[in-house]
Image (cartoon, helix red, strand yellow):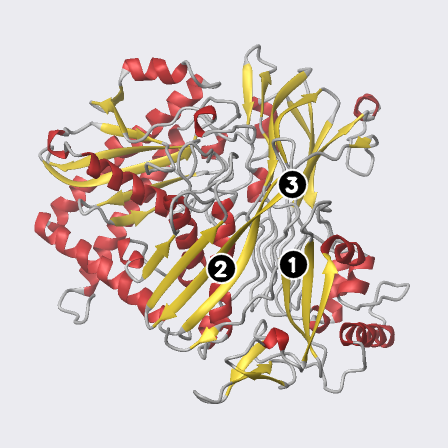
Amino acid sequence: MTTMRDYDVVTAEVHRKAVENLTNEMALAMVRTSTSPVVYEAKDFSTCFFDTVPDQLGFSGYVLFHIGSSRGGVRSIMELGGIGDLKPGDGYITNDPRAGGAMHQADVGVIMPMFYKNDELVGWGFANMHVLDIGGVGVSGYAPGARDVYQEGLRFPPVKIIKNGKIDSEWARFIGANVRAPAAVLSDIRSMIAANNVVANQRLNSIIDEFGLEGYRELCEINKNLSEELLRERISRLPDGVYESADWNEFDGHDGPDQLLDMRLKMTVSGSDLRFEFSGVQQIDAFVNSAADAMAGQTMTAIMVMMVYGDFPVNAGMWRPVTIDVGEPGTIVNSTDPAPCSNAHSEVGMRACKLAKETLSQAMALSDDPEIRGRLAGQCQDGFPAVNLFGPNQFGGTSVVFYVDNACGSGGGAQSIMDGQDAYGLTCMTGCGIADVETHESMDPVLWLWRRLAPNSGGPGYFRGGGGIEQGFTLHYTDEMAGPGFNACAEVPPRGFGGGYPAASGTYYPVRNTNVTDLLAAGRLPTRDALTGDDITIRSKVGHMSVKRHEVQVWLSGGGGGVGDPLLRPAKRVAQDLADGYVTAKHIRNAYGVVLDDGGEVDVEATTKRRNEIREERIGRAPTAALQPPASVGAAVILRGTNGSRQWVCGYCGESFGTSTGNWRTAEAAVGREYPIHERYEHLDMYVKERHEEPGVVLREYYCGSCAGVLGVDVATSDLEVLPAPALGQP
């Protein structure tokens, strides 16, 4: 790690920006040459550049979790050997989550060696995108009906199919014969080759010409050291200790049973080091299983967003303070063949990201540093509903319908300084966006009916979670399409933090026997309010479903968790949220305790009365202390005292919950309540899918027995032990 500034700072920064711009130019080339709106509009791709170690030097960051898969892909190629035989223009294709280079099989990567003056190997370029299809029983790389990995489609460990900057013609014929959209898939592979071979290689040579080969290599090491130094400094501002959390991956496919797959995380902070230890139940014969590189990518995504995003040079230096342990092979967090894994990234993988963000927020809330406390947040939805379809289109050909709208349209978690962002997207999707409905309609046989923010989708809090979108579309120009449906977050919604409540879940469902034809014939747009028909409840994981003309597909993205006690949110802001359509009248009365008069203004007296009623309902008696905003929103339980005599203390009123070696949740001065989550959500006018099998899903709400402030709200299974408090001190 750098300890002395024995180099020119300006030169180091110029070098860093040059390498960063190299990856951005690779990304720009892909946007300009791709034929898929998944890339040129939604931007579901990433680019990365490595030295020969191989260490990352630059990353474009459109989808953050590729920071892990890219690393695994290049390492796998180097482990194959034969590097000395490579020539300029050679390249590999990879999409195997277990062999490296992909988060799931539809994320196809192209990795190419970079040469200086067509002679000396100086690095590796990596380009990755979600291609429209990869074959198999699923559509567009998602196969909830698969029982093993071999059913999920083409799988490439790193395979050298590129020579002289072109796909080998035999390999092109093979790939084209095995995917549903051969022209688009092959075109996008060529787009990734161009990003590597034309852009990265040429740009790299000009960078090395500027700095000289030895100077270039020295500056690479300097910038990696600087990133390590910066991340270690931020980690050191977290309290040493062990922080734990639990989550569950949902799977109700294969005709049942409805499973909740338990997974845990123990995060240890020790000085300037972070260690993440994941564990999970045994792998299952379903597409939810994750792999080591996917878990690493999701964990680093959480670190980047929570601790460094926006002001941090992204390179291999940030991996050095971090250890990620996924345990023994054969579990859902470290699966092996033949277990399916085509949704490794957004099922178990995204639960890993949520767990990492949760434990980081626990540590941040206890930091003495206000900047670090300011980075804590509620969880994002980090799961999305989708129906991927294949069938005839309006042009006499076929269409693969894969839209990332619901992923990009899910709500973001609130932070300690602001409400969550509406239509924030998944945590990893920092550079992605929602495609225009006109793009969908111009390419596929669909007619979009509505797209709007879903009321009450963000979790209640002093700062409320961001809202998710609701969309509806129908088939147009064709009679039927078919494919899988899936949703990762239906029964177990994302948590809030520090007194904030969880968000609403997402869902998808068909509406049949509709009046769409009549409305269109009458010149009326079939909006949700105008639509009639039968809402059909279906499983969250469906291997194959048919969608017919005049049915309507309704997709609901969930929201993000809230931060801070909702009773402390200013009543006028709540009233404005109602006026703007973010929330409903029932929701503001029961979640925020706000009552409006007939003119839509806050009824101060009635609101004060209602909020006092809620406080009494929480603890079963009249509070004896005032409910005051904490020093930092989200720091609902804090530490006071010095080492050896530290106490858990209520952030609202100062009530003690005992020594820091105990669990504040079980303290005598704390009050706990447990509710079946669907009943509690009905009271709050929020959506969650009701679960009908054991164990149930519950909300465990913890309040201060003196002021009735919300200390925390755990989403848990009914059979889960009480979650532990942080165990502080040098581990």
Residue 54 in the figure: left or right of residue 433 = left
- Find residue 405 and report its horizontal and vertical position in percent: 58, 38
- In the image, residue 210 above or below residue 73: below
Q: In the image, is 712 to the left or to the right of 122?
A: right
Please give the residue where the numbered disc 1 appears in the rendered image: 502
At x 91%, y 63%, the residue is 598
**Secondary element at tag 1:** loop
Q: Earlier in the sequence, mark 1 or mark 2?
A: 2
**Residue at the disc numbered 3:** 258
Which image quadrant for residue 677? bottom right
Please name the amino acid that badge 1 sits on.
Pro
Query: Which class describes the residues within 10 Å of circle 3: few (<14), some (14-19), or many (20+)?
Result: some
Residue at image coords 48%, 22%: 136
Q: Nearer the viewer, residue 407 or 14?
A: 407
Q: Position of residue 449 (x, y in %)?
A: 71, 32
Residue 81 spot, x, y in % from top left? 16, 34
When asked about the image quadrant of residue 63, the answer is: top left
Residue 60 in view (yes/no): no
Q: Amino acid at mark 2?
A: Lys
> Which SS class for mark 3?
loop
Furthest-top residue in this view: 396
Q: Nearer the viewer, residue 247 or 301?
A: 247
Task: Give the residue drawn at x 31%, y 67%.
Answer: 232
Q: Earlier in the sequence, mark 1 or mark 3?
A: 3
The residue identified by callout 2 is 357
Q: Quick one: quadrant of the C terminus?
A: bottom left
